[in-house]
Image (cartoon, grey):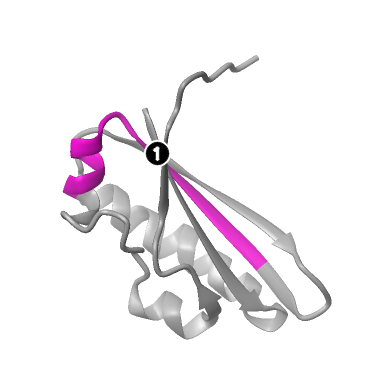
Amino acid sequence: MIGRIWHGWTKLGNADKYEKLVKEEIFPGIAAKKVLGYKGIQLFRRPIDNNEVEFITIMWFDSWDAVKQFAGEDYERAYVPPKARELLARFDERSQHYEIRERLEY
């Protein structure tokens, strides 16, 4: 299993709009690609201070081939649709990837 991690930051006033966009358009759009081996995605949110909110996404893939099918050969390049770019103050241009060595759920 591969975890693909990405960070983006919004101004406080854009945080709810960004979260809505992610949940209602971006995540369904990713699922609609029907990438074989794509296992899901999570969205994390935390306030940084009174003016900025950090978002993290973690995508789950069952192989490196699935990651590359989603992102292309330059698989570390971040996937940030134009509507999201308009709401983000800054974001990682590259995603980080980790092999999941153990996963326990209780």
Q: How far across and how far down the image is residue 41, in percent?
A: 44, 44
Image position of 56 (left or right of 51): left
Image position of 15 (left or right of 4): right
Q: Badge 1, how many Cα within 10 Å: few under 14, some, many 20+? A: few
- The residue stretch that appears in magenta: 54-69
Position of residue 87 relative to residue 79, above or below, is: below
Quarter placement of the N terminus: top left
In the rendered structure, does residue 58 fall within the stretch colored magenta?
yes
Image position of 41 (left or right of 53): left
Q: How far across and how far down the image is residue 85, in percent?
A: 43, 80
Examine the image and state in which quarter residue 39 appears: top left
Q: How far across and how far down the image is residue 29, in percent?
A: 30, 58
**Residue drawn where x is 30% and y is 48% of the image:** 31
Image position of 105 (left or right of 76): right
Q: How far across and how far down the image is residue 106, in percent?
A: 65, 14
Kind of residue sitting beneath label 1: Gly
- From the image, tell me which residue sits under label 1: 40
Position of residue 97 relative to residue 52, above or below, is: above
- Front residue of 32/105: it is 105
